[in-house]
Image (cartoon, rainbow, N blue to C red):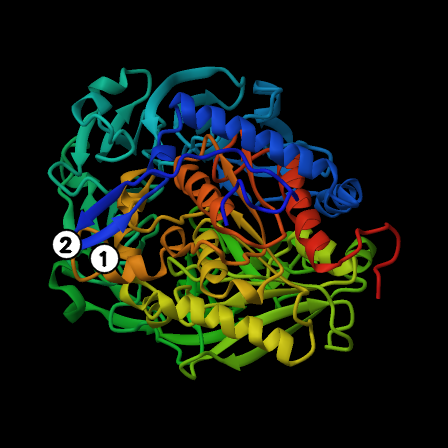
Amino acid sequence: MTPETRPALRRYPHAERQDLVRELHGLRVPDPYGWLEDGEAAATRRWSMEQQALYEAERADLPGLERWRAEVSALDAVDRAGSPEVRGGRTFRLRRRADQEHAVLVVAEAGTAERVLLDPGALDPSGRTVLDRWEPSVEGDLLACQLSRNGTEDSLLRVIDVATGAIVDGPVDRVRRSSIGWLPGGEAFYYVRHLDPRLHPGEERYHRRVYLHRVGTSPEADALVFGDGRDRTQFYSVSVTRDGRWLGVTATLGTGRGTDVYLADLSAGPLERPLLRPVQEGMDAATRLHAVSGTGPRDPVWLRTDRDAVRGRVVACRPDELHRGPAAWREVIPERPDAVLTHLVVLSGPELKHPLGLAAWTRDTVAEVTVHDLVEARQVATVPLPGTGAVGDFSAGPPGSHEAWFAYTDFVTPPRVLRFDARTCRVSGGGHDAADAAVAAGAVTRQVAFPSRDGTTVRMFVISPTGRPDVPRPALLTGYGGFGRTMSPRYRAQVLAWVRAGGVFAWAGLRGGGEEGEAWHRAGSREHKQNTFDDFAAAADLLTAEGWTAPGRLAIMGGSNGGLLVGAALTQQPERFAAVACMSPLLDMVRYESSGLGPSWTPEYGSADDPALLPTLLAYSPYHRVTPGTAYPAVLLTAADGDTRTDPLHARKMCAALQHATSGTGPVLLRLEHGVGHADRSASRAVALQAECLAFLAHHVGLPAPEGGPPRQ
């Protein structure tokens, strides 16, 4: 069925279907909409404007859109605060009030109230400037901050005087969410910067290096410390103990799991040329170094690693023996067969008999926190949590402190910061209030387990008005299944909005994620990627078979790698779903390496340049599986022109292919947003995106818009 013969329900903008075929390793790979890759071409811009006009016309007719927007906005309008960072008598934290568009960075001196130090909204009333990362100096008198605009995540780094707010250094360009390793005294720090793009045209977001920057000097005079001659896709991080003794550097190949780790004793040589000794090199294992102030060459440092322990463990080693590798390691927190180690904070205050490790785990995707004596290698406590949820944003107090902080959240609890006291192994700050109870009303969470196509057990959270499949309801299924990321229970306004309207929201933990450790991740990556899609299909089967929903009432939604997930589900089993929201997606898996951060993702997906993996990529690549004459469900593709991770070309090409191919009655629409990117955005723009996706999906599965007041049963 061509656009000219399609029933007169809607007429899509014309997209030339070219006879472009690429021959790769003897395979002919059609790419009829390859011309849409060039976002600046006049034809692409004209087509995109026509698609936007079509979307705006369809959006105007969405039933209850304003009620969805009001509900999501109300549920999102909660006060949020991050874990504090204590430096030199000052406490820094991110805080966002319910009425603010962006989180602001606040600081408090001892005995004084918090004051705003950095407000992205005040710097840019348009809301397009985002605070990407920040790090106070050891003494707390300076702050290194990184801000980007229009969603690009290409940051400018500046140094601010904390007392006055004045900029004392910068901007330093070619920085992207770099870690910062301050040296005592605030005169210098280590950081990560890209090479001048003129050296490698078209690769401006690669070729990273670690530098030493002296505050007040030109960044072009910075000393190159690490990274020369290494692969262009390597990512680096830096850390310095607060006494300035130890510099740690990690290197990973793209988004691969294998971590090269190096440690330098900064007291042993010039800061510009630290002698970085390998802790781990060339191993397919993720390892993170934890060192504290006051550590000497014969004192222990700790490594959180999945080397020889796919679910993670912690080992201790002396810096003067790290060169011996695992032979010098002493296990202090063993691998657990039932849980995955996700975080570690080391506390070594003088009131503690021995250093303690505050460890976070996920067991069946739910967080647990334990406390361990790092000398006697034994668990000493389990930390009670407010509910069945997730933890993160860990921070420790100043050197010698017995305090740590971390955030807790679940599907009905907005993030809250808990304080841990190592002297008593207790937490405070976890109570629920009346506002929490009002939000939680009418939203009950259950976790279910089910077999995938090959018999593997998969788990999923189902959030519904009653907690049981009492009647078939409109259901919305989401997942991710990539990069070792765990789909933990987290507060999301769109989840509660859907459930409070009377629907079922399902949150699946698929292979490719980190729910069961590194083996689970690898079982859904590269040549095993189809397992992710099979797990998702099994989740959909369960929702229907157990009566949570019914045929014709199931929608799916996913973003980024989750956009690839729902794109694959859409093209492999189009009859199964009534509607799809495919957000910031990867969809052309033959060409994904040619744009955005694609070259960094070959450890996850493999490369089309590899003749052994090209058939795998081509077999599930959603763009290449679109088949003319198929009755595809209603599809909403979303993209942003500032997205430097997943280029909007994926959504454009898929939109054109589906509009040409579908014989279904549901629309295929493209929502292209300007001035934002892949990650953080202002609260109102995030609410608008979520509400429009929910309204689109709800319309096609028969879920009435929220009416306000008590949740619909």
Q: Nearer the viewer, residue 424 or 286?
A: 286
Q: Real-space Cα distance between discs 2 and 1?
A: 8 Å
The quarter of the picture where the C terminus appears is: bottom right
Residue 58's quadrant in the figure? top right
Determine whether 291 is above or below 379 in the image.
above
Q: Is residue 112 left or right of residue 207?
A: right
Residue 576 in the image, given as x and y percentages of width and height: 57, 67
Q: Is residue 310 left or right of residue 101?
A: left
Amino acid found under the numbered disc labelled 1: Leu
Kindly indicate whether the residue at mark 1 contacts the one at mark 2 (C-beta within 8 angstroms).
Answer: yes
Q: Nearer the viewer, mark 2 or mark 1?
A: 2
Query: Among all residues in the image, which is located at the extreme front?
Result: 5
Helix, strand or loop under label 1: helix
Residue 138 in the image, given as x and y percentages of width and height: 40, 35
Amino acid found under the numbered disc labelled 2: His
Count residues near mark 1 (Cα–Cα under 10 Å), then give few for <14, some for 14-19, many for 20+. some
Could you tell me if residue 97 is visible in this image? no
Q: Nearer the viewer, residue 564 or 271?
A: 564
- State the residue at coordinates (40%, 34%): 16
Determine whether 460 is above or below 345 in the image.
below
- State the residue at coordinates (32%, 16%): 216
- State the residue at coordinates (19%, 39%): 232
Could you tell me if residue 281 is visible in this image? yes
Which residue position holds label 2? 25
Query: Among all residues in the image, which is located at the extreme right?
Result: 709
- State the residue at coordinates (46%, 25%): 45
Count residues near mark 2 (Cα–Cα under 10 Å), then give few for <14, some for 14-19, many for 20+. few
Say the numbered circle drawn on residue 614: 1
Residue 631's quadrant in the figure? bottom right
Q: Nearer the viewer, residue 305 or 461?
A: 461
Q: Is residue 125 left or right of residue 240?
A: right
